[in-house]
Image (cartoon, rainbow, N blue to C red):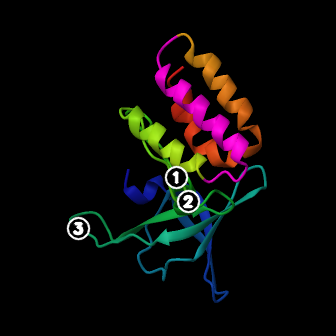
């Protein structure tokens, strides 16, 4: 059986200009349509229609005409790469799928944002120094003094059983100043 003998589908090609080519024998596959009439002026963005036995019509858009010259006993033909109209455009679909691999301690992923955080996983001294600088910006002197005192307790009790109690006291004293301490909370909770 010749390759053209495998062409059991009947298709119609409609060019963007409106020109129509009817009754063309082809072999329609999900992403490729084989057309053995090399004289057809098939181009990208042409539409190919195939009527199904149910009466429904499938519409394909030509992405790449895929013309192959004849060689030996095989005549010139098209292996047109197509996309079914109404299906997800793979280029657009692939551009919205993002895979993020994060590894290591305190890995972060920032999408369309600036990362102003610091990694304190191995330097708790730096954590408490930066926290002290942040607390210095509190306007209410009484709260500032209490927060410095509890911060010292928190620092001296890290990795001990009293750390949790000091942490809770620290958070409750600064409840109205969460914007000041919020960037430090993840690093502080790791010490519990």
Q: Where is residue 139 in the image (x, y as percent from the top left)?
A: 70, 53
Residue at the image position 57 percent from the left and 13 percent from the top? 162
Question: Relative to 61, is 178 on the left or the right?
Answer: right
Question: Relative to 49, is 27 on the left or the right?
Answer: left
- Residue marked by disc 2: 113
Q: Where is residue 36 in the image (x, y as percent from the top left)?
A: 43, 67
Q: Residues at badges 1 and 2 in contact (C-beta under 8 Å)?
A: yes
Residue 100 is at least partly visible in this image: no
Q: Residue 79 carries which label?
A: none
- Residue marked by disc 3: 71
Residue at the image position 72 percent from the left and 42 percent from the top? 142
**The magenta stretch spans residue 144:** yes
Q: Residues at badges 3 and 1 in contact (C-beta under 8 Å)?
A: no
User: How far apart are the two marked residues, 1 and 2, measured between alpha carbons?
Assistant: 6 Å
- Residue marked by disc 1: 110
Residue at the image position 77 percent from the left and 43 percent from the top? 176
Q: Position of residue 91 (x, y in %)?
A: 52, 62
Count of numbered circles on the image: 3
Q: Residues within 10 Å of mark 3 (few under 14, many from 20)?
A: few
User: How far apart are the two marked residues, 3 and 1, measured between alpha carbons?
Assistant: 54 Å
Mark nearer the viewer, 3 or 2: 2
Q: Nearer the viewer, residue 78 or 113?
A: 113
In the image, which residues are magenta? 137-160
């Amino acid at each position: 059986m010749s390759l053209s003998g495998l062409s059991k589908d009947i298709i119609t090609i409609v060019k963007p200009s409106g020109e129509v080519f009817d009754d063309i024998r082809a072999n329609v596959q999900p992403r490729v349509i084989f057309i053995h009439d090399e004289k057809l002026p098939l181009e990208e963005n042409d539409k190919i229609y195939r009527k199904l036995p149910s009466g429904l019509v499938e519409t394909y858009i030509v992405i790449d005409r895929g013309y192959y010259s004849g060689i030996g006993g095989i005549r010139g033909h098209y292996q047109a790469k197509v996309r079914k109209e109404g299906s997800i455009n793979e280029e657009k679909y692939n551009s919205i799928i993002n895979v993020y691999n994060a590894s290591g301690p305190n890995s972060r992923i920032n999408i369309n944002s600036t990362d102003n955080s610091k990694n304190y996983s191995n330097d708790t001294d730096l954590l408490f120094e930066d926290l002290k600088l942040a607390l210095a910006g509190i306007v209410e002197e009484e709260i500032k003094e209490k927060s410095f005192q509890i911060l010292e307790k928190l620092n001296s009790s890290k990795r001990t059983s009293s750390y949790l109690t000091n942490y809770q006291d620290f958070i409750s004293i600064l409840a109205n100043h969460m914007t000041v301490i919020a960037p430090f909370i993840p690093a502080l909770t790791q010490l519990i």
